Amino acid sequence: AQSVTQLDSQVPVFEEAPVELRCNYSSSVSVYLFWYVQYPNQGLQLLLKYLSGSTLVKGINGFEAEFNKSQTSFHLRKPSVHISDTAEYFCAVRGTSGTYKYIFGTGTRLKVLA
Amino acid sequence: GAGVSQSPSNKVTEKGKDVELRCDPISGHTALYWYRQSLGQGLEFLIYFQGNSAPDKSGLPSDRFSAERTGGSVSTLTIQRTQQEDSAVYLCASSPRKDRVTYEQYFGPGTRLTVT
């Protein structure tokens, strides 16, 4: 079984400051990892994903995440945030074989302040 | 192209009534997922369908919940004898066929269910 922990339910940050949203997972098998973003009053959309290869993954809107297998983490980062990045961010995990089931974290609400 | 659509967008029902929520996936997507999103609870997996395989129902919270997918396309999530704790946003997502390695889920806008 897999689980995902997003320790921070809310993260306030000033515009143009860097941000890191934390995600830790637990799994007994190899996993794929994802970050989804949900802008206010919109559906979820994929931000980035790690399937294999380079542990540093770049996504849309200047976001990137690093897969750390030893620490079972997949933290999301952006060097300089904009007001438009205000949204809820979800980390998700899926086993690499035998299942198509995704497990999502509880989400982190990023609020960018002017 | 058209994305995942869900209907109705909002549903208010009285406790004890049955409700049906509909999902139209992206054409050609073989995988279809249902999730429940409650405030502060993130996305809770309910069920997924993959092609002609038996669905994974492991996330359905009780036997009041059921889902079907007709003809490998449209899906209906049914909640019988609704309870107030069923109030949430129900999200549907679809994914392309499994041999096209994208692993991306495309989400619909959701159905907001309120049980009074």
Image (cartoon, grey):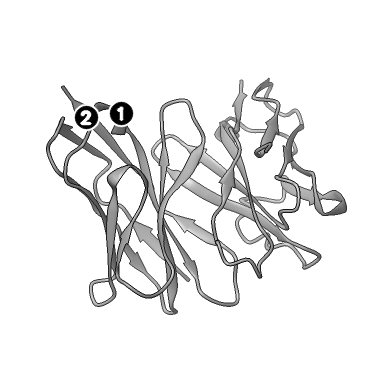
Q: Name the residue under label 2.
A: A112
- From what the image shows, is residue B59 above or below residue A42? below
Determine the residue positioned at 69% across, 62% down.
B97
* Residue B2 or residue A73, whichever sits in front: B2
Label 2 vs 1, first from the N-terminus: 1
Residue at 57 percent of width and 63 percent of height: A101
Residue A74: which disc? none
Q: Residue under label 1, please give it.
A: A84
Percent position (x, y) of residue A70? 24, 77
> Split into 4 quadrants, where in the image is the N terminus of chain B?
top right
Q: Residues within 10 Å of mark 2 (few under 14, many from 20)?
A: many
One can see residue A114 in this view = yes
> Mark 1 is on which residue type?
Ser
Q: From the viewer's perspective, is B74 left or right of A94? A: right
Position of A86 with respect to A11 (left or right) is right
Percent across and percent down for residue A90 are 39, 47
* Crowd band around label 1 with a 10 angstrom C-alpha radius: few (<14), some (14–19), many (20+): few
| Left-right relation of A20 to B96 | left
